[in-house]
Image (cartoon, coloured by chain):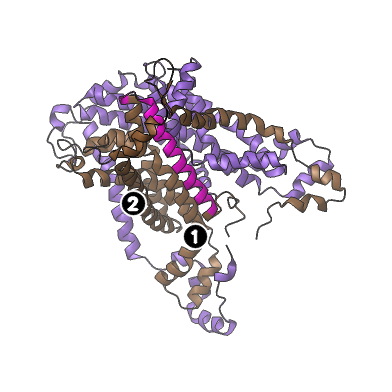
Chain colours: A purple, B brown
Amino acid sequence: MSHGTLHRPRPVRAAERRTPAGPSRVRRHWTRRPNPLAGIGSAVWLAVVIVPIYTMISISLTSQDKALGNNALKPPTDPTLDNYNTVLHNGFPHFLLNTVIVAAAVVAIVLVLCLPLSYVAVRSRTFWSGSAFRLFLLGVAIPAQAVVVPLYLMIAKLNLYDSLVAVILPTAAFAMPVSVLILTGTLRDISEEMYEAMALDGASSTRMLFQLVIPMTKGGISTVVIYSALQAWNNFLFPLIFTQSDGPRVLTLGLFNYVSQFGVNIPALLASVVLSGIPIFAVYLVARRALVGGLMGVGGK
Amino acid sequence: MSTAVTPGNGRRAGRPGKGVRAGRPHASWALPAVLFFTFFAVVPMALAFYLSFTKWNGLGDPQPAGLANWKKLLDDDRLTQSLTVTVLLTVVSWAFQTVVSLLLGVWAAGRQRNRAVLSAVFFVPFLLSSTAISLLFYALLDPNFGIIHRDTLGSTSGAFLAIVFVGGWQFIPFHTLIYQGGARQIPEVLYQAAAIDGAGRYRQFFSITLPQLRNTATTSGVLMIVGSLTYFETVLILTQGGPGTDTAILPYLMYEAGFKSYDFGYASAIASFLVVAATALSLLLVRLTGFGAMRSTREGM
């Protein structure tokens, strides 16, 4: 972005104004006076965020017969953990484990494949490396839904149907385009001089990958880890189409199946939603900075 | 500002041959990633086109069917309706999410303690998977249990707005984060200059913050538009395309044709249409915004 938008104050005027205002007042624009409009706005959004979460927890602690027709905004009169018990005894731990396996595998595949590719895309100047990068650039917009029918055919032919591998491989493939964009973005910031310094030491491309590129792109790598783990965590369509039995069922699909399994037992359904949020909420509590910082990176920070 | 590596830079080194080759890996390093992505994303795309000219019920082998599926697609009233709903959903979601996350992001960029605490709370919805969030609102919008004791999902506009709201509820925290990162990168000196010139808070917002967030808005907008194609599970869980077929977005139409009616040829025709539309959209976005080129931290300033 150009600096042309910056209107430089004429020096004389600046001097006049600065004296009465005092330098500390203009130093940080955000710590001056309270902003009432922003206060109201953030309070409204707080309600939008909190009310559904509060209602969810409140209903999940109410027994089914009491929840019906009850005012959901009132706290439960005698809270019960029965709904959580129901969920935990209906395969929840198993589904969670499957999701964790899928997420770990997806992250590993994405990193192992995308790091060398991004390295080549940024450093190599051949026609082929440029084409490889453009392939992934276009891939950003391929909707996973559009390929689910042919993938179903391929996975059936490969004898992978109804296995975790059938979920892992396509999920990893579809996490790759954005990961490549993130990694190339960070890799571009390594200066030419550092490569040259290592080249003078006689380092090979492989050594540069491990001793320069990977240490210097830690930020990008952690973003990619979080991004691809989230893809696996959120993925619904691939498991829905490529798996069938309880064995390879992941959490999202497990939750979806509770709809028909629990039927009108809405409190149990909400308990399953609460439970599904707990593991990642724990991660958030422990590593909020890393998580938030990494996600900011998806926006190209 | 940018010191990004440009093609000629390597030649500056004293020993040209060495400098050019410094840390420039062979293009074949990109091969594993390219092959993997091609197999699981590009080949299925081609296969979708092929299948759109066949008749296949999911068992046995696809039989050639000529243009039958495409004729059916063009004659299908639901296609026009579905296309309208998809575009409308994308545009309305983009507007809703951009306005809210821009305001929240700029607000959260302030360093006050209360803003930091509230931002941490605002982030919580993003921790739940889209399936979990869809289930949460499926339960909360249930006329017998939820907060609103009315059949929200029974009316066309109610169902549509519910999908927009649920999508926003999940993704606004993420885009807020992107805008927060963007707002924090705006050079403080711009605000100092504006304050010296006597610009008030709102004038500063419209004359400095908004123009400076142009690139952030582009990145976030591209992610939103591409991401709104993934509202599939929200539609499947909340409305099942209903009432009638009023919220049947393209991916849902495809899912129904394929995995409910077992007409995979027809589903592939819809999928191919989706691929063409999405690729055209992404080419347009990449052209218009230079999305691929500007993702380095040193650029965009």
Position of B271 compared to A118: left or right? left
Considering only order in the chain, which callout, 1 or 2, is on the residue closer to the N terminus? 2
| Of residues A131 and B106, the one drawn nearer to the viewer in this rendering | A131
- Indicate whether B41 appears above or below B171: above
Q: Give the range drawn in magenta.
A: B260-287
Residue type at the position of mark 1: Arg
State which chain disc 2 sits on.
Answer: B
* B63 or A111: nearer the viewer: B63
* Residue situated in front as seen by the camera: B41 or B261: B261
Which residue is pictured at 22% across the width and 30% down the height? A267
In reply to whether residue B136 is colored magenta, the answer given is no
Estimate the x, y position of residue A130 in percent, counting from the top left: 66, 43
Q: Which of B87 and B79 is in front in this view?
A: B79
Q: Residue at (72%, 44%) from the top-left corner?
A: A125
- Which residue in the structure is indicated by mark 2? B92
Q: Answer above or below: position of A37 versus B292.
A: below
Residue shown at the point (54%, 42%) measured from the top left: A138
Q: Alpha carbon of mark 2 to alpha carbon of mark 1: how far?
A: 20 Å
Q: Which amino acid does label 2 sit on?
A: Val
* Label 2 and label 1 in one chain: yes
Estimate how packed mark 2 is, as few (under 14), some (14 to 19) or many (20 or more) residues with alpha carbons within 10 Å: some
Which mark's residue is nearer the viewer, 2 or 1? 2
- SS at mark 2 in the image: helix
Which residue position is annotated with label 1? B214
* Residue B285 on the magenta segment: yes
The quadrant of the picture occupied by the C terminus of chain B is bottom right
Q: Is the magenta stretch mostly helix, strand or loop?
A: helix
Q: Can residue A282 be seen in this view?
A: no
Residue furthest front as drawn: B66
